């Protein structure tokens, strides 16, 4: 068997006389385990969402928590395994009710087709193993025993044991694929069934008695358990579902208010209006007036950080819980059309289709578009292109304010921000703190001296902190070794770790190494990790958040 052609693209046609099967054949697959790690300890254990470039098996070993899969959340269950496809994001968090323990296995899955080996696509593999869904492995305890053996063998110096880990990984995948029995019913699943009922039947009259019966619990116990589990009562959740659906209808149609009320389960439009105002702080008519301007955002998520300062919420915009979590969480339900954070050309084409479907009267985008994208956008609606970032965010915000007829709103926001940053700079000076700051980025195996325009604007030009590296330009990525790092005098080191699977795996290993732990900046606890959001985004909202985070770090409150 040749493994030197594993990355062969499936665009090639099968060899003559060979037909290309439509379904995945487990008997023709090859599995390669690439990394294993176990996270266990505090009940509030949190793994921030990360991008996996390979398949990942998430195995819940113990405790209680929630698995975050993109914009979905799934209750983690013991003796269950979750298979995550490449180019997906995942994370998890404990719920405080017990010590959470989970394991991640990163693996490649290849399939032989037409005499060649290539990466098995998620679409084909899904026919054999359910993706992103908890798969029970029986008997109880078998999964944990197998996983801990894989972890121990994979990290052994004995190459035979490493081989054993590869075999056991295949055994684990086989156990998941062989599952056909129904999952055991527990109280969390029962509550999830009642939630699903509300989300599907919100138009109907729904009572606690009905929901408790669906969950097979007593009404009193159901009410208490639902609120304890989700932090809100069942009826409050039902109201939220109905209000979100109502906003969706208001954003996508010109229905009468009374018709919208009926379509989300309210027979009395006046009662619906009162509930809407209680929920969002403005009446349905005020909300519809605010949303009457149909604007679409195409391209970078940072454009949202300009648009929202002008109190304009677009009808279409690129959103993702990993790449733009603040915008996704806070405004996702107000934006009917969620564009992909484009990583491939075909995603751009799909995004353009969504922009057209949103029927915008104006499209806000950036200047570095492909000619075919600009031509397609121009055929949908007039385009406003933000100035290049080198011109500065203020010029971009003022230009957008003029285009939207909101110049005073733009000037007001700039004045407020300038006042804030002057106030914080003064607070630093009065406290006697003017730290020397070093900003670093870790990508795969390497560190880079790193500074972007947002860091320059806020840290050095705004708050007036000193740079630990003199003559460091903006938008620079300068490779630097650990030995060179140890020679830099810095009071605070801001470290940005890229959240791809390879970088995270290398970073995990490095943190345990003597070469890292012996660095003076590490020994003296001067290193503070920062997140891509907001530190890599250049927009008014991102800079405002960077000011807040920087002040927490410089005043000794780095989380």
Image: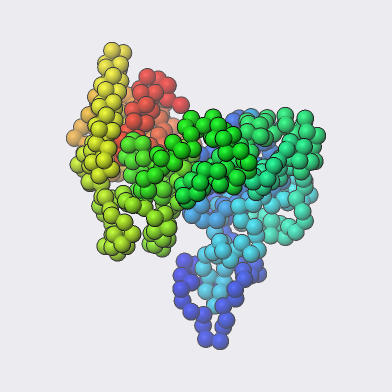
Image quarter where the N terminus lies is: bottom right
Q: Nearer the viewer, residue 510 or 270?
A: 270
Rendering coords of residue 271 (x, y %): 59, 34
Q: How is the image coloured?
A: rainbow
Tell me if I can see residue 435 in this picture. Answer: no
Please say if 113 is above or below 135: below
Name above or below for residue 433 compared with residue 186: above
Quick one: 493 or 288, which is closer to the camera?
A: 288
Choose between 437 and 453: the one closer to the eye.
Answer: 453
Quadrant for residue 525, please give it: top left
x, y percent for residue 51: 48, 48
Query: x%, y% of residue 19?
Result: 57, 81
Question: What residue appears at the point 32 percent right and 51 percent down from the top-left corner?
Answer: 362
Residue 73 location (% of width, % of height): 59, 43
Answer with left or right where residue 196 lies relative to residue 9.
Answer: right
Identify which residue is drawn at 69% across, 56% down. 176
Instruction: Determine which quarter of the picture holds residue 439.
Output: top left
Vertical placement of 9 versus 452: above or below?
below
Report whether 371 appears left or right of 35.
Answer: left
**Could you tell me which residue is drawn at 56 percent across and 87 percent down?**
17
User: Which image quarter: residue 558?
Assistant: top left
């Amino acid at each position: 068997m040749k493994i030197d052609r594993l990355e062969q693209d499936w665009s090639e046609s099968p060899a003559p006389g060979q037909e290309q099967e439509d379904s995945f054949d487990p008997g023709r697959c090859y599995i390669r385990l690439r990394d294993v790690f176990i996270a266990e300890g505090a009940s509030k254990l949190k793994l921030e969402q990360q991008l996996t470039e390979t398949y990942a098996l998430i195995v819940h070993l113990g405790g209680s928590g929630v698995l975050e899969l993109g914009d979905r959340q799934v209750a983690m269950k013991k003796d269950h395994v979750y298979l995550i496809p490449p180019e997906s994001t995942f994370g998890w968090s404990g719920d405080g009710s017990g010590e959470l323990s989970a394991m991640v296995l990163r693996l490649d899955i290849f399939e032989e087709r037409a005499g060649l080996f290539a990466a098995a696509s998620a679409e084909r593999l899904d026919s054999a193993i359910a993706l992103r869904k908890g798969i029970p492995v029986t008997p109880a305890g078998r999964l944990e025993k197998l996983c801990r053996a894989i972890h121990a063998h994979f990290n052994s110096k004995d190459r035979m044991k490493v081989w054993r880990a590869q075999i056991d990984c295949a055994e684990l995948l086989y156990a998941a694929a062989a599952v056909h029995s129904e999952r055991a019913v527990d109280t969390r699943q029962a509550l999830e069934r009642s939630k699903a009922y509300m989300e599907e039947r919100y138009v109907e009259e729904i009572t606690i008695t009905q929901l408790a019966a669906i969950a097979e619990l007593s009404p009193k116990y159901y009410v208490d358990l639902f609120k304890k589990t989700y932090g809100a009562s069942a009826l409050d959740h039902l109201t939220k579902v109905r209000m979100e659906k109502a906003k969706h209808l208001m954003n996508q149609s010109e229905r009468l208010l009374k018709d919208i009320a009926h379509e989300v389960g309210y027979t009395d439009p006046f009662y619906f209006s009162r509930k809407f105002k209680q929920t969002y702080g403005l009446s349905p008519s005020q909300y519809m007036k605010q949303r009457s301007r149909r604007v679409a955002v195409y391209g970078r998520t940072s454009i949202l950080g300009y648009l929202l300062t002008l109190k304009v919420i677009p009808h279409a915009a690129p959103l993702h819980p990993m790449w733009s979590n603040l915008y996704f969480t806070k405004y996702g339900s107000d934006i009917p059309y969620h564009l992909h954070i484009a990583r491939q050309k075909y995603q751009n084409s799909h995004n353009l289709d969504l922009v057209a479907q949103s029927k915008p009267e104006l499209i806000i985008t950036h200047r570095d578009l492909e000619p075919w994208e600009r031509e397609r956008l121009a055929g949908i609606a007039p385009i406003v292109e933000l100035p290049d970032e080198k011109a500065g965010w203020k010029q971009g915000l003022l230009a957008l304010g003029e285009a939207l007829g909101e110049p005073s709103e733009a000037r007001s926001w700039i004045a407020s921000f300038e006042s804030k940053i002057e106030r914080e700079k003064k607070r630093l000076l009065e406290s006697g703190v003017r730290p020397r700051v070093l900003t670093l980025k870790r990508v795969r195996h390497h560190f880079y001296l790193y500074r972007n325009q947002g860091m320059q604007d806020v840290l050095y030009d705004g708050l007036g902190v000193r740079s630990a590296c003199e003559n460091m330009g903006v938008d620079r990525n300068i490779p630097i070794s650990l030995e060179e790092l140890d020679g830099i005098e810095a009071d605070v080191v801001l470290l940005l770790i890229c959240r791809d699977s390879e970088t995270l795996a290398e970073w995990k290993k490095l943190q345990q190494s003597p070469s890292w732990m012996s660095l003076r900046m590490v020994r003296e606890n001067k290193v503070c990790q920062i997140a891509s959001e907001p530190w890599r985004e250049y927009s008014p909202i991102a800079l405002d958040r960077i000011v807040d985070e920087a002040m927490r770090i410089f005043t000794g409150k780095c989380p």
